[in-house]
Amino acid sequence: MAINWFKYSAPSTFYALAGKLIPFVAIAAAILFALGLYIGFFVAPVDAVQGEAYRIIFIHVPASIISMVLYLVMAGYAALGLIFNTRLSSMMASAIAPTGALFAFISLWTGALWGKPMWGAWWVWDARLTSELILLFLYFGFIALHASIDDARRADKAAALLAIVGSVNVPIIYFSVKWWNTLHQGSTIKFTGSTMHIAMQQGMFITLAACWLYAISITLLRVRSIILERERNTQWVSELSEVKA
Amino acid sequence: MNQLSIGNLLLLVIRRDLLLAMRRRADVLTILVFFVMVVSLFPLGVGPEMSMLRKMAPGVLWVAALLASMLSLGRLFSADYLDGTLEQMMLNPQSLAVLVLGKMVAHWLVSGLPLVLVAPMLGLQFDMSPPALGVLMLGLLLGTPILSMLGAIGAALTLGLRGGGVLLSLLVLPLCIPVLIFGTGAVEAVASGLSVVSNLSLIAALLMMCLVFTPWVTAQALRISLE
């Protein structure tokens, strides 16, 4: 039997698939969030060095990881859209961008909240903080470029090219910032405590999974809106039950 | 029709753009004045204490150069775009990337090189030492072409858009951060008696990389903007 690998690359079929997936993913995200935060706040022991303040890692670390990986995922989808001229890939890229920016922002915000009791300052020009900030700027650039071009197809392609250039630049920026900081001074405080307690690890991995599922469900939700907006003049959209109602 | 060699084509584009720039000298001077003015504002803002000014001089000069080059990027393709020349260039059977490279070189000669030449004078106002001035110039000499080349990508992507200027800065400035870091790093290395080779080599490496990739990427961006 021949499998049609490209069945779900058509916006019309993907729209329906995404609609079916969203409830499962969203519910799983909610359950894992509740579980992960419960472990984080009630089960995981108090850290020997950092006291209670360390508990922010259950949000901070997943947000940072996801904000970085999402940029690459976004650039990947954008590149697919540019190379194969598939509409859905470009729509996915523009659906991912706001979520990526949100996680970058959460990562910076929670980092500042953690930094105040730990380092005694809301912000230090640490290499990782700075590169996260630059990542947020890169997301803003992508979103702003996409928003300022009226023709959707041109916007997709231009933003895709920017995302690809950005993703080539990300490692260069990361290392330049790292070397820049070590030239000035080393990190003020490092995570030098002994190996992490098992409950801390569990809590962090569970919230990481929860954040992933959240990112996926929100992206699917957003891509559905984008599909509807872009395909509003097509036959299949006018036949949808939610559009008719 | 006889085909031009790549070198001749490159020279032709550079010569044309330089000629056009010379016909509108005010544009070139405006950028230079902007650069001088921004740098001069810093002592007024942070106070005239020499030891502090000496310390921040490389950063101030580099950031001002970055902003000045952003200012001139909007004009890189827009005049040719508005009068239709750019479309003719794209119909050209020869590689668009070569044409783009020519425009980048011309842009650097007009807006980057003058900054490099003026920088030592401004550095003196900040009481920089002669060796530091030399390294600053060398860094700018290697770094400002990168700004022109990365900026060209942004200029091509934002061609003909409303609010293009601000958007252009938003797109390009984050990409320029490594140049800024290595450029100021080299000057600070001189000040603290370290070797400047690593920082300058890294800028040179970035320059080589940009030289290979950015003309091609910019050509793609122009095709997207004009299709």
Image: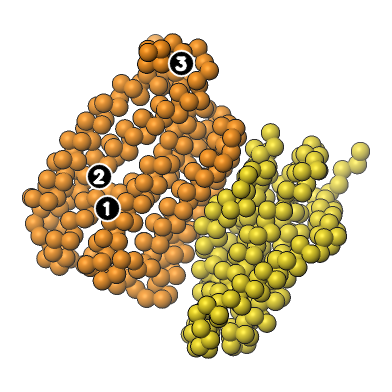
Chain colours: A orange, B yellow
Count all numbered tags in the image, as a single digit.
3
Residue B112 picture location, percent across and down: 69, 66
Look at 52% across and 27% down and name the residue there.
A86
The answer to the question of whether label 1 and label 2 lie on touching residues, with beta carbons closer than 8 A, is: yes
Task: Give the amino acid type for the residue marked by disc 3 in the picture.
Answer: Val
**Vertical arrangement, residue A20 with respect to residue A39, above or below:** above
Task: Give the amino acid type for the residue marked by disc 1 in the picture.
Answer: Val
- Same subunit, labels 3 and 1: the answer reads yes
Considering the image in quadrants, where does the C terminus of chain B appear? top right
Residue B217 picture location, percent across and down: 63, 46
Q: Nearer the viewer, residue A31 or B38?
A: B38
Q: Nearer the viewer, residue B24 or A68?
A: B24
Residue on which the image places disc 1:
A61
Question: Which chain's residue wears label 1?
Answer: A
**Vertical arrangement, residue A185 with respect to residue A149, above or below:** below
Residue A141 picture location, percent across and down: 51, 49
The answer to the question of whether label 2 and label 3 lie on touching residues, with beta carbons closer than 8 A, is: no
Q: Nearer the viewer, residue A49 or A114?
A: A114
Q: Earlier in the sequence, mark 3 or mark 1?
A: 1
- Same subunit, labels 2 and 3: the answer reads yes
Task: Give the amino acid type for the residue marked by disc 2 in the picture.
Answer: Leu
Q: Is residue B153 left or right of residue A214?
A: right
> Which mark, by number, is residue A208?
2
C-alpha span from label 3 to label 1 = 40 Å
Residue on which the image places disc 3:
A237
